[in-house]
Image (tube, rainbow, N blue to C red):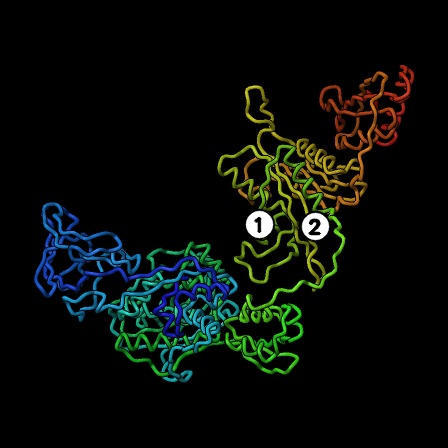
């Protein structure tokens, strides 16, 4: 946001320019720069272009004859807009501009007596589209800085998202007045009756009151389109807006003056004498002011006349109703559009403007009519027209008055001050907060609509008191709090372990934002889910707090695959948000999620071409759980796998019988929703659920001095039988002597009956006390076979 000091002083006196940046910082604005403009323009005179001819040796140059009042001179100019009869700014030889010193010299063989300057070359603005054409009544032969008020100071500030009221000169002036004690001067605006003569010329129908909460319209007739007054052009230049004409410039002027976006329609192009505010139809199109045809969806809000769309609400007007040199009657739109809807349309279409920026952050709904009246008066004055008596105002659901009680004792307790309640009231009145009632104990404060989204609680009022009192004037005090023993949070420690474990397994972290869309989360559900929704999301695509990390993980996979990064191993450790009962805060457990795709090993001369499979994902989960301290009780249950995994290639992860996560191969149906055409494996584990199962210490087990025996056995089981339970059953037969159980072969085919599979195990058997005999080993193997037969119907091959 750029602040023009000349413009600002229309509303408040600024006595100490050097102190102004400090005041703005105290008001919550970050001052990014202070720049003087126009002060260095010396030696530039006004002149008239008498004639323009083509340069004899350059297609893009023109040879101009100019009259400075003291004689005629020849100047070579490359600007496309130079024309005979114009009054221009001539930088004579010897003067110094921000672009350098001007000298008399030959340009491609033609002597040039100076330079016809653009605004950028004069340091007035960044506009270098052509030379600066001055008003036709500008006297020639005068020093430019004597006939045009060039000198100004421009302060650039960063406005935080919670203070949209500061995106205008009046809002800045309000804060300056509050800090300096100066009087705030508002623009003088006449009063008009609602309805009146306008009623028979235009009507407004709002079909979606949630998307358009208020729509007002004024009319100005008999206008002439011409350049704006010089003061308005210079002020718009100072804030970074290129002047166009006296009608369009007024809408921009009021935007930066009062923070109310406006739009001017050529009334002659509006059919049916009506304005209809409605949602677009899917596939509907319209051509915007930039001459581009836009394809719309049902989420876009349109401004229509009796037959067609004429504007994209809050974003851009339509080419079919824009003002032109022939415009004589103007309809001025001033409205309040939903911040969410404007941002959604602006983001989807890639259309961002000063108006959409303000609508997205919220404007003062009570200032809608006032701003339209201000614009109508300026257009009538500068366009030599007349305001049609009356106005249209459709305001279906006025906002309820917001009154907040501020307790004096509470305020002083929080701030550590002794400010009296009457003084608190005086401070708040400085920023136009209304005092409904007050006594020695409390103040009832009416919050105006331009601060309604920022001040919603008592603590917000306390912050305003502290800010206006001055943080430097609040004496520091030591908080009266008891020192409490630090109790380590096991979840925080587990998060650190989880990250280290995943990195140690070769994964890279891919953190994502917690907000996503309902559609993305529903892709993992058999039916629409219940989620934690944001009250004021930036867009519909970021309106839900995710209840799973997997949707954003697959989004990252899709993005990588689209960029030909096909070998992936990524993870994320973050909170998820699970809705609680009505009125309660959401449950926020911490999860770890991972995804795998592509080759199992880097492409080296010695590596294999094997791609990742289910067992890579399962191995990741096993090693991860062991690394964070889950040393026993881990089970993988295929029958309980979520439905978004392929049947037979997914499993629920349980620890000591309690579900803690899942893993598997994602189904093609799910992956198609993320534009993924590769095999992707992954899983998710609830870290918070692991806390009760973490081993406090790792028990050291000494090495045996006696030899180890290895026995292999193969059994026939049903083809649908998971192998994990078989291996666990074998280990449980004799945990003292069976050290390890490995699966080294799974076979179906010739020699194995239909519906069966052969699973071959290798058992490591060892004693800590003596050398095991063949008979000892045979007895253990016999018990294993008996256990498998009894529990699973297995047959020894």
Left or right: where 640 falls relative to 303:
right
Q: CA distance from mark 2 to mark 1?
A: 16 Å
Residue 311, how many percent across, how many down? 39, 64
> Residue 574 in the image: x percent, y percent?
64, 47
Q: Is residue 55 above or below residue 632?
A: below
Image quadrant occupied by the C terminus: top right
| Residue reaching furthest to the left | 71
- Image quarter of the N terminus: bottom left
According to the picture, the residue beneath numbered tag 1 turns out to be 513
Residue 579 appears in which quarter of the rendering?
Answer: bottom right
User: Disc 1 on helix, strand or loop?
Assistant: loop
For the residue pair 131 and 728, the one nearer the viewer reads as 131
| Disc 2 packing (10 Å; few <14; some 14–19; many ≥20) | some
Q: Is residue 615 above or below residue 608?
A: below
Tell me: 154 left or right of 565. Answer: left
Q: Which residue is mark 2?
A: 589
Quadrant of the rendered structure where residue 186 is?
Answer: bottom left
Examine the rendering and report whether any part of residue 88 can be seen. yes
Frontmost residue, 303 versus 708:
708
């Amino acid at each position: 946001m750029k602040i023009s000091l000349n413009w600002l002083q229309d509303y408040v006196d600024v006595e100490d320019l050097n102190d102004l940046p400090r005041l703005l910082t105290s008001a919550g604005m970050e001052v990014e720069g202070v720049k003087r403009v126009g002060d260095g323009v010396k030696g530039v005179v006004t002149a008239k272009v008498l004639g323009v001819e083509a340069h004899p040796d350059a297609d893009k140059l023109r040879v101009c004859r100019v009259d400075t009042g003291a004689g005629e001179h020849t100047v070579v100019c490359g600007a496309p807009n130079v024309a005979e009869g114009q009054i221009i700014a001539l930088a004579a030889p010897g003067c110094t501009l921000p672009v350098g010193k001007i000298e008399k010299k030959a340009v491609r063989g033609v002597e040039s007596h100076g330079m016809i300057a653009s605004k950028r070359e004069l340091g007035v603005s960044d506009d270098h589209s052509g030379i600066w054409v001055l008003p036709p009544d500008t006297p020639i032969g005068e020093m430019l800085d004597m006939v045009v008020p060039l000198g100004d100071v421009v302060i650039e500030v960063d406005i935080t998202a919670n203070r949209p009221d500061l995106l205008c000169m009046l809002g800045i002036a309000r804060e300056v007045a509050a800090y300096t004690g100066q009087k705030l001067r508002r623009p003088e605006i006449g009063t008009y009756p609602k309805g009146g003569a306008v009623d028979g010329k235009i009507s407004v129908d709002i079909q979606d009151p949630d998307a358009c909460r208020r729509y007002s319209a004024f009319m100005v007739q008999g206008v002439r389109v011409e350049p704006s007054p010089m003061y308005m052009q210079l002020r718009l230049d100072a804030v970074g807006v290129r002047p166009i004409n006296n009608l369009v410039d007024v809408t921009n002027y009021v935007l930066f003056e009062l923070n109310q976006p406006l739009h001017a329609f050529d009334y002659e192009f509006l059919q049916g004498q009506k304005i209809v505010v409605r949602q677009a139809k899917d596939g509907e199109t319209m051509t915007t002011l930039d001459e581009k045809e836009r394809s719309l969806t049902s989420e876009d809000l349109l401004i229509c006349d009796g037959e067609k769309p004429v504007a994209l609400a809050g974003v851009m007007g339509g080419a079919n109703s824009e003002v032109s040199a022939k415009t004589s009657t103007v309809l001025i739109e001033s409205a309040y559009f939903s911040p969410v809807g404007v941002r959604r349309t602006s983001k989807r279409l890639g259309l961002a403007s000063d108006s959409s920026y303000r609508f997205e952050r919220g404007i003062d709904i009570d200032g809608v009519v006032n701003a339209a009246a201000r614009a109508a008066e300026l257009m009538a004055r500068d366009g030599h027209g007349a305001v049609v008596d009356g106005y249209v105002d459709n305001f279906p659901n006025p906002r309820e008055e917001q009154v907040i009680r501020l307790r004096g004792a509470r305020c002083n307790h929080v701030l550590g001050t002794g400010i009296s309640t009457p003084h608190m009231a005086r401070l708040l009145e400085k920023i136009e907060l209304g005092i409904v009632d007050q006594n020695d104990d409390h103040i009832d404060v009416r919050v105006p609509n331009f601060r309604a989204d920022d001040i919603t609680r008592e603590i917000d009022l306390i912050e305003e008191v502290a800010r206006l009192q001055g943080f430097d004037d609040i004496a520091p005090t030591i908080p009266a709090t008891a020192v409490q023993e630090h109790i380590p949070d096991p979840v925080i420690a587990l998060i650190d372990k989880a990250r280290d474990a995943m990195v140690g397994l070769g994964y890279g972290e891919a953190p994502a934002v917690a907000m996503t869309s309902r559609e993305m989360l529903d892709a993992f559900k058999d039916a629409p889910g219940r989620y934690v929704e944001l009250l004021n999301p930036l867009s519909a695509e970021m309106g839900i707090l995710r209840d799973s990390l997997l949707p954003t993980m697959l989004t990252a996979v899709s993005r990588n695959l689209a960029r030909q990064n096909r070998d992936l191993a990524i993870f994320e450790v973050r909170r998820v948000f699970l809705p609680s009962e009505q009125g309660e805060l959401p449950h926020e457990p911490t999860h770890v999620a991972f995804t795998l795709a592509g080759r199992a090993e880097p492409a080296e001369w010695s590596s294999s071409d094997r791609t990742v499979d289910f067992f890579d994902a399962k191995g990741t989960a096993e090693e991860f759980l062991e690394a964070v301290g889950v040393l026993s009780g881990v089970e993988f249950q295929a029958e309980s796998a979520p439905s978004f995994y392929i049947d037979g290639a997914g499993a629920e992860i349980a620890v000591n019988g309690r579900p803690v996560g899942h893993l598997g191969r994602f189904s093609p149906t799910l992956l198609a929703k993320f534009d993924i055409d590769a095999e992707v494996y992954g899983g998710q584990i609830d870290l918070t659920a692991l806390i009760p199962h973490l081993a406090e210490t790792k028990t050291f087990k000494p090495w045996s001095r006696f030899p180890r025996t290895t026995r292999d056995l193969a059994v026939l089981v049903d083809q649908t039988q998971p192998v994990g339970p078989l291996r666990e059953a074998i280990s449980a037969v004799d945990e003292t002597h069976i050290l390890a159980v490995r699966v080294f072969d799974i076979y179906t085919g010739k020699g194995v009956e239909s519906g069966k599979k052969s699973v071959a195990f290798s058992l490591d058997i060892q004693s800590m006390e003596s050398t095991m005999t063949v008979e000892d080993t045979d007895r253990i193997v016999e018990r294993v076979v008996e256990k498998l037969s009894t529990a699973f119907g297995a047959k020894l091959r």
